[in-house]
Image (cartoon, rainbow, N blue to C red):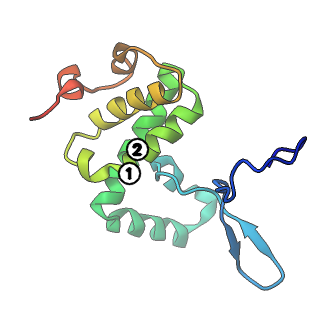
Amino acid sequence: MCAQCGLVVAEAAVDTGPEWRTFNKEKRVRTAQLRLVVKTDMAVKPEHGVRWRMLAKFHRETMHSYERRLAKIGAELKRIRECAGLPQRAVEEAEALVKRYFDVVGGFPPEVVPVAVLWTAAKAAGVPRPLEDFLKCSKADERRVRWRGG
């Protein structure tokens, strides 16, 4: 709705912000968007204690292959973003693409997927860069990134 004239632009606006969660009747909490798991998110510090370290080790050892793959891709996305100097919104778009098309990109090496997805996401975010900018920050082979299958 326009704040000046009152024109209704859309009847059902979609809230893309964080979700509301209720843990008790008095307090509602907003949660963050779902994101890829990054290896550094699973770090355990000495002050966490022995039981916490054992639990973290158990979690790492029992991670599903899907989760391990997402962790590798997420860490590589962040590393390439910093090296190529991309804005955070490009990484968020890349993470969304990985989640949406994981069944398609799942068979590619984990160093190829972040390059291809960041390259596409940078274009979509309005900050296109040449593929070489991403390749110099990655261990991926250009032939594998440009492969079209068929």
> Residue at 21% of width from left, 41% of height from top?
108
Q: Nearer the viewer, residue 15 or 66?
A: 15
> Residue at 86% of width from left, 48% of height from top?
6
Expressed as whole percent of the image width and height from the top left, the position of residue 53 reads 50, 65
Numbered tag placed on residue 145 in the rendering? none
How far apart are the alpha carbons under marks 1 and 2? 5 Å
Residue type marked 2: Leu
Residue 112 vs 59, above or below: the answer is above
Residue 69 vs 117, above or below: the answer is below
Q: Which residue is mark 1?
A: 100
> Residue at 35% of width from left, 64% of height from top?
63
Residue 12 vs 140, above or below: the answer is below
Q: Is residue 53 left or right of residue 33?
A: left
Mark 1 in CB contact with mark 2 (< 8 angstroms): yes
Residue type marked 1: Arg
> Image quarter for residue 138?
top left
Looking at the rendered image, the quarter that the C terminus falls into is top left
